[in-house]
Amino acid sequence: MFKFLFGNTAPAPQVKRETQRETVLRAQSEINEILATLSPKPRITIYPEEGSFTIDLPEQMPDEAKALPAPDKPET
């Protein structure tokens, strides 16, 4: 009678948890792929004491449109 409620109880799919090493290696690979496409190359600074790094990107990225100033209004 209640088969439609309890009949389709398939077990949840098992999801493999990523280890910390796998997470770091994946993130490093993704960052390297992105940085390889940039020109000019950004400056990377590593802070070993803090365990962090910064990426100094140029002020204007190649894919960002350069905004031109508004044209001067003609004097009348």
Image (spheres, helix red, strand yellow):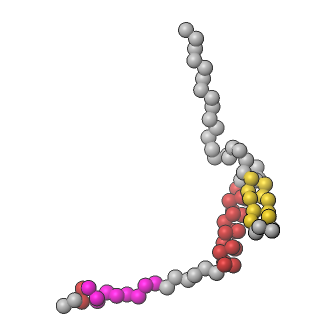
- Give residue 62's position: percent from left, percent from top: 67, 46
Q: Nearer the viewer, residue 62 or 72?
A: 72
Q: Is residue 40 left or right of residue 66?
A: right
**Can the viewer see residue 39 in this picture?**
no
Image quadrant containing the C terminus: top right
Work out which residue is located at the far top of the displayed protein and give it.
76
Q: Is residue 12 above or below residue 56?
A: below
Q: Nearer the viewer, residue 75 or 61?
A: 75
Q: Quadrant of residue 3?
A: bottom left
Q: Which residues are magenta?
A: 5-13
Q: Is residue 73 above or below residue 47?
A: above
Work out which residue is located at the far front of the displayed protein and give it.
50
Q: Residue at x 74, y 59 (%)?
A: 54
Image quadrant containing the N terminus: bottom left
Q: Is residue 41 magenta?
A: no
**Can the viewer see residue 51 in this picture?**
yes
Classified by dominant secondary structure, the portion drawn in magenta counts as loop
- Give residue 58's position: percent from left, percent from top: 73, 47
Q: Residue at x 59, y 26 (%)?
A: 70
Q: Residue at x 61, y 20 (%)?
A: 72
Q: Is residue 5 left or right of residue 52?
A: left
Q: Quadrant of residue 74?
A: top right
Q: Is residue 65 left or right of residue 13?
A: right
- Give residue 41's position: percent from left, percent from top: 76, 53
Q: Is residue 51 left or right of residue 68?
A: right
Count up the numbered dots: 0
Q: Residue at x 46, y 84 (%)?
A: 13
